[in-house]
Image: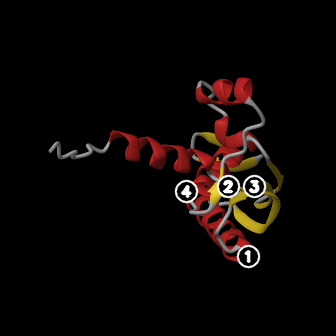
Amino acid sequence: MDNEKFDFGQVKISDDVVIIIAGIAASQVKGVSTARTGVADGITNLFSKNNYAKGIKVEINEDTVVVDIFINVEYGYRINQVAKEVQVAIKKEIETMTDLQVAAVNVHVLNIVQDKEKDKDKDKDKEKEPVDIALE
């Protein structure tokens, strides 16, 4: 935890706060897919405050942070590019919001995910399109 002395006491930043900052930053990078293991897990995640905390570990030593994040990358995105963008986004957000120095952001790519939901939505849209039929 970060212990910074102010005129009226100390400010302590929990590991969980840093984890959530990292999770939100990573989720905003294009190509990062949210990890859901099943239907029950997906429903639980919808109502969970710590939805962003899954798959992230942090180690805080004095004023430095090391982040390990485990992500899925959407099919069609360049894995190295997505990983670099995740590193930059996490480093920027943690340093901006907490004044802690990020020593490392280790990105672990666990899986490639094909977004079938987008394909299903496209099929539904095709079904909704009006069809003009000329009767002769």
Q: Is residue 133 left or right of residue 1?
A: left
Q: Where is residue 67 in the image (x, y as percent from the top left)?
A: 79, 58
Mark 1 or mark 4: name the one nearer the start of the chain: 4
Select label 2 or label 3 by which is in front.
2
In the image, residue 33 sits, relative to residue 106, either above or below, namely: above
Mark 3 or mark 1: name the one nearer the start of the chain: 3
Tag 2's secondary structure? loop
Q: Residue at x 71, y 66 (%)?
A: 101
Figure quadrant of residue 45: top right
Query: CB of mark 1 within 8 Å of CB of mark 4?
Result: no
Density class for disc 4 (Cα within 10 Å; few <14, some 14-19, many ≥20) is few
Select label 2 or label 1 by which is in front.
2
Q: Which residue has dot 3 on it?
A: 71
Select label 4 or label 2 by which is in front.
2
- The amino acid pointed to by label 1 is Asn
Figure quadrant of residue 17: top right
Q: Which residue has dot 1 on it?
A: 80
